[in-house]
Image (cartoon, helix red, strand yellow):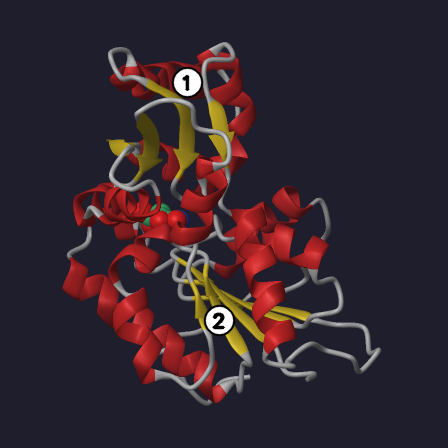
């Protein structure tokens, strides 16, 4: 089926998931939505996040997507279960794939989680980890608000990044964990800085690859794969600052993005 896959995130971070989807499913068309006007989701209420995400899903519906990936951990934590029965396309979240991936390598009774405040407060990572580990493993979360600002500004390394990474990691000094889940799409872009600072203590889990594999399975099961043989195109939509998005996205994807369309999903559902 030659219709697109929708990927949503609060901003540019979801490109960490798009990259994996591109490598697992290079023939698929993609519409990427970064809700940059409402970023960060981390300090919004569950009701606000639900409203933002439903608007994006309605936009995707108009675009006739065949599946949606909620790349955003916050949306996966707070909106996924409510959204699934309301739309007729499959919606894939990142938390279950992340937990399954983590369980392949964890040898401790706790697992560390970097995420934003909204995701941690939802308790969803802990709930799913307990479910899949028969209550043997619990999640210890640390909110990392500065990470999103760094990545959105195109800053991935340097003394300031190192200092903040160290401070956030120190939250796990007395925690019995050998694995750290990067529970926000933005954080994998800081993986080199995190690796440098943790000096080999943690196995780092980026949910993106396992999510892309789950999407591939679902497309196959439902017979939705693109077999048209046409070169797929990618379209980017943002709710604020399209130029800044194209600049940082080009840097992150190592490829020039010509345009991101500026859109307000609440008022411009007919756009492009
Ligand atoms: N990228 C989003 C996520 O994966 C969160 C960033 C934000 O707080 O907006 O949860």
Q: Classify residue 181 as left or right of residue 120.
A: right
Mark 1 Cα shell of 10 Å, populated few (<14), some (14-19), many (≥20): few
Q: Is residue 267 left or right of residue 9?
A: left
Q: Can residue 21 be seen?
A: yes
* Above-or-below relation of 98 to 239: above
Q: Secondary structure at mark 1?
A: helix
The residue shown at (62%, 43%) is: 252
Q: Position of residue 99 (x, y in %)?
A: 41, 44
Q: Which residue is mark 1?
A: 160
Judged from this view, the residue extending furthest toward the right is 229
Q: Earlier in the sequence, mark 1 or mark 2?
A: 2
* Inter-mark Cα distance, 1 to 2: 35 Å
Residue closest to the eye, 159 or 92? 92
Which of labels 1 and 2 is toward the front?
Answer: 2
Determine if residue 266 is in view: no
Left or right: 18 in relation to 86:
right
Q: Quadrant of the N terminus?
A: bottom right
Disc 2 residue lies near ligand 1 with CB under 8 A: no
Q: Residue at x 63, y 83 (%)?
A: 3
Residue at coordinates 69% horizontally, 76% vertically from top-left?
225
Q: Quarter of the image holding residue 233?
A: bottom right
């Amino acid at each position: 089926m030659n219709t697109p896959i929708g990927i949503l995130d609060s901003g540019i971070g979801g490109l960490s998931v798009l990259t994996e989807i591109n490598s697992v499913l290079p023939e698929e068309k993609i519409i990427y939505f970064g809700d940059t006007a409402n970023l960060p989701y981390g300090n919004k209420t569950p009701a606000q996040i639900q409203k933002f995400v439903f608007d994006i899903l309605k936009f995707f519906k108009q675009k006739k997507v065949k599946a949606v990936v909620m790349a955003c951990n916050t949306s996966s934590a707070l909106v996924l279960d409510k959204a699934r029965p309301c739309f007729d396309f499959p919606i894939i979240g990142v938390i279950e794939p992340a937990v399954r991936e983590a369980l392949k390598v964890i040898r401790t009774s706790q697992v560390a989680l970097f995420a934003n405040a909204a995701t941690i407060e939802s308790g969803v990572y802990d709930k799913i980890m307990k479910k899949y580990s028969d209550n043997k493993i619990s999640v210890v979360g640390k909110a990392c608000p500065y990470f999103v600002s760094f990545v959105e500004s195109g800053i991935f390394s340097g003394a300031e990044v190192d200092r903040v990474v160290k401070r956030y990691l120190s939250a796990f000094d007395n925690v019995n964990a050998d694995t750290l889940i990067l529970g926000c799409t933005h954080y994998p872009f800081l993986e080199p800085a995190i690796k440098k600072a943790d000096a080999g203590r943690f196995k780092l889990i980026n949910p993106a690859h396992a999510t892309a594999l789950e999407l591939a399975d679902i497309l196959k099961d439902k017979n939705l794969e693109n077999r048209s043989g046409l070169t797929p195109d990618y379209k980017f939509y943002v709710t604020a600052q399209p130029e800044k998005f194209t600049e940082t996205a080009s840097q992150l994807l190592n490829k020039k993005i010509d345009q991101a369309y500026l859109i307000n999903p609440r008022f411009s559902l007919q756009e492009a």
